[in-house]
Image (cartoon, rainbow, N blue to C red):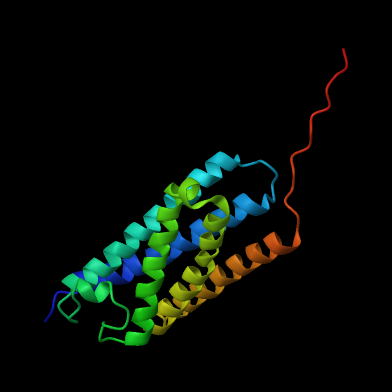
Amino acid sequence: MTDPTFWLEARASGLLAYLLLTASVLAGLLLKSKPFGNEPRPASVTDAHRFLALLAIAATAVHGLTLVLDRSITITLSDLLVPGRIPYRPLATGVGVVAAELMAAVYVSFSQRKRIGAKNWRRLHWATYAVFAAMVVHGAASGTDTKEAWVRALYAVTVGLVAAATFWRAVVPPRRPARVARASA
């Protein structure tokens, strides 16, 4: 019998990566839509958004590497970089590879914002929606836990949260903090 440790780690890290990505997307939407004004502080939300994105990338890397180490399927490091090369459900896993690469590109753009310009940075940042959608497709179509009711509920809740936050951002203008009236001297 094959040791299931890496398979279990791959499943757990994949779901963790998805949850961290969801949290990062929601933090980014919170930052832009400001439903609570300037609370929490925008700088704190920005830091949390970037940190959650970094953790999502790290969990995604663990997900891929544990699949390479798992002996129940043959996956090479190069398979993790070229969409469609993984033999197990190649379309769904290829979507996951593209999403991971795009997620890394968006994250790298944080540090390149001044170099590429704010307008181009924002355009690239819109790709986060594609990353999120691709991760949902990847998980739902290739995840072995998708048949479990709790995983389907997890996808439904997280997609609902991102959709609601996106709707809020699109429809409701950002709440600006109330100005403190100056006492006339």
Name the residue: 20% across, 78% down.
Answer: 75
Rendering quarter of residue 71: bottom left
Residue 44 drawn at (x, y percent) = 53, 41
Name the residue: 83% across, 22% down.
Answer: 182
Residue 36 drawn at (x, y percent) = 69, 47
For residue 143, say whether it is visible: no
* Image label count: 0
Relative side of 156 to 69, left or right: right
Name the residue: 40% across, 61% down.
Answer: 105
For residue 61, say whether it is visible: yes
Q: Is residue 170 above or below residue 68?
A: above
Residue 96 drawn at (x, y percent) = 38, 75
Q: Nearer the viewer, residue 171 or 36?
A: 171
Q: Is residue 147 above or below residue 96?
A: below
Residue 123 drawn at (x, y percent) = 55, 61
Q: Nearer the viewer, residue 78 or 135?
A: 78
Relative side of 149 to 2, left or right: right
Rendering quarter of residue 26: bottom right
Q: Residue furthest right?
A: 184
Q: Is residue 122 above or below residue 73?
A: above
Rendering quarter of residue 4: bottom left
Name the residue: 61% across, 53% down.
Answer: 30
Say which quadrant the C terminus sits in.
top right
Say which quadrant the N terminus sits in.
bottom left
Q: Residue furthest top?
A: 185
Relative side of 76 to 38, left or right: left
